[in-house]
Amino acid sequence: MVTISRFRDALSRLGMLTCALILTSCGGGGTGMNAPAPPSDPPAPVSGCTDCGTTFITLTDADGDFLSYNVDVVSLTLKRANGTLVETLPATTRVDFAQYVELTEFLTAATIPNGSYVAATMRLDYSNADITVEQNGAPVAARAVDASGNTLGIVDVTVTLDNRHHLVVAPGRPSLFSLDFNLAATNAVDLTTTPATVTVTPALVASLELVEQKDLRLRGPLVSVDRTAGTYVIDVRPFTMHSMRFGQVTVHTDADTAFEVNGTSYLGGAGLDALLAAGPGTATAAFGTLTTATREFEAQTAFAGTSVPGAGVDTVIGDVIARSGNVLTVRGGTVIRNGDAGRFARGNVQVTVGAGTKVVKGGSAPGQVVDIAAISVGQSIEAFGSATPVNSAALSGDWTLDATAGRVRMNPTRIYGFVKQSGPGALTLQLDSIAGRRVSAFDFAGTGMTPAQDADPANYEVMTGALNLSTLTAGEAAKLVGFPTPFGAAPPDFDARTLIDFPRLPAALAINWSPIGATAPFSIQEPGLLVLDLGNPAVGRVHVLQVGPRVFNLSQLPASPSIVPPQDGPAAYLIVLRGESHAFRDFSDFVAELGTRLDGSTTMVGFNATGNYDDASNTHTARSIDALLK
């Protein structure tokens, strides 16, 4: 079983895979089970179709207990109302779900026929899964098993849409379809075994809208540039793939779009000129948003050429856990070699920098060039240079990367902590985590102007500038985004650019029941309100509410929280049973279906809700719910 402390870790970084399908018409008329071997004749992608729409598929991951979760996505099949199956992926795609935090990645721009779609099935292959969890600050390998303890192989995860909200692909405005695969809700980690064991019960939450608004990433080789229109076209090639074409997408830019092409920064039109000069086939990666009305991708930042990880140069992506002189230690990072797929290194990656290393500080347009001293402990980086495995027989272990003639990109870093005190332009935290890693993983030696001034996680000093601290109170949880102070220059220890206080922190409520489950898990079950019956004798060991890094035992709250839908914006709710799962957009439909299912012969064994928590009213506003029935 997963313990409360491990479940806290899982909730603190809610793992979620999101597939968003954006469907533009061209006109015209099981979850959680081992599946059988792939059929000999799977539905084939449509080609040469004159009555089809374009499908953009994206994947994302929110914070999760996992440092890596590499699984092969074999297929993603949509089912029309008439029973026709349409395959949307042209090739098996290996995905590290754990690496997509606060980010969504475009997977493919497929072509599918117009019509009404009622279900989706994602086929996952765990045969060569590479899963890493954190134990006492160190990455350790984990084995994926089913509920019976059997090693996983092929798994089909199917979701059916509710009758009132089918996915319709028709002439006119593009449609949108998203699939969320919640790692925290569907994976239980047991660290008492060797290797660690991850019990998997996968489930997909389907929605006709993006429930979480995140930055989108779009990658692939350049096709063309339209300088007049301010756009460029790419062949979609997601993740670190070096072959295959997954359709074409147009990227829209404006005068504020920041470019970095082959290590040089540009802004607006000058970036398009540099992209044009680089020529077709140049690797690109753009970050931006999707315009709701037009379903157009608007780039805020675009990288091209050797500025794209793994394109012409080896790259290490991760967080600096220690620094000694000009050697940065990244433990548990992703190594992407030139022309090769990325791999997660569970050991240490020693990154060497020097006077010839170009360091760019992200978070501004264009990026600010700084000295190598700017890179301190806790900094999230992408380092470009020459990577070498320390032991070629163990490519997932220790590596070195020589960046003395290369580059390091400093990315904005997120930290969680508890407020100890605040004043004008500054606050002190009891630091809980950096970039999703527990502070026990970091060695702060050398961060201060003197050893006595090295950063202290128990009293982590944050410079907040003009950020509004008036809502903060002592003991409150908070999230900040910014940059650690340059190495050897603390205090303060961190320069914050963004503050997210307690009411806006992501909140996750999770509860389980005994193996037989509960026939009446709620004390109140109304169209707009659910209240869990915490006095039910079947309530299991997990019954927590986590808001950022703060964990509440539900049984110790004054009362069971009210669970309500948001007043506006998208939401997605899922009922999971063996062999089937059903998605709902409306909270009232979800509650009604629960009432029908919980008829005395069916029980609830798990309930996970994510959203925001208001402690004043003891109300959890849930934008997403997974209800597991038996």
Image (cartoon, rainbow, N blue to C red):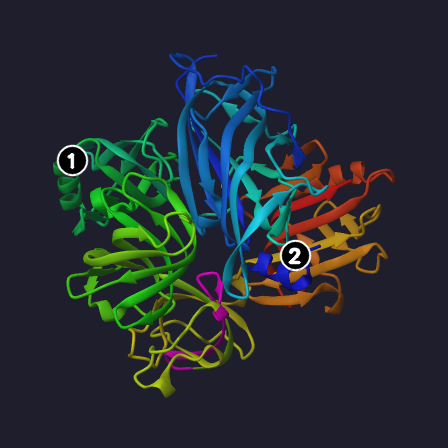
Position of residue 83 measured from the top left corner of the image (x, y, whole percent): 61, 16
User: What secondary structure prevails in the magenta region?
Assistant: strand
Tell me which amino acid carries mark 1: Arg
Q: Which mark is residue 247?
A: none
Q: Disc 2 vs disc 1: Cβ atoms closer than 8 Å? A: no
Tell me which amino acid carries mark 2: Leu
Where residue 546 sits, quadrant-wise, is bottom right
The Cα–Cα distance between marks 2 and 1, rounded to whole angstroms, is 49 Å
Q: Which residues are magenta?
A: 423-440
Where residue 225 sits, quadrant-wise, is top left
Question: Which of these two is toward me, 554 or 434?
Answer: 434
On the picture, is 460 further left or further right than 313? right
Quarter placement of the C terminus: top right
Q: Residues within 10 Å of mark 1 (few under 14, many from 20)?
A: some
From what the image shows, is residue 183 above or below residue 112? below
Question: Which of these two is toward me, 601 or 623?
Answer: 601
Question: Which of these two is toward me, 603 or 242?
Answer: 242
Q: Residue at x 78, y 56 (%)?
A: 540
Position of residue 164 measured from the top left corner of the image (x, y, whole percent): 63, 29
Position of residue 535 measured from the top left corner of the image (x, y, whole percent): 83, 60
Instruction: Return the residue at label 1.
Output: 227
From what the image shows, is residue 432 above or below residue 48? below
Secondary structure at badge 2 equals strand
Q: Residue at x 55, y 31 (%)?
A: 122
Q: Residues within 10 Å of mark 2 (few under 14, many from 20)?
A: many
Please tell me which of labels 2 and 1 falls first in the chain: 1
Quarter placement of the N terminus: bottom right
Instruction: Return the residue at label 2.
Output: 509
Give yes or no for residue 438 being in the magenta stretch: yes
Position of residue 559 measured from the top left corner of the image (x, y, whole percent): 75, 65
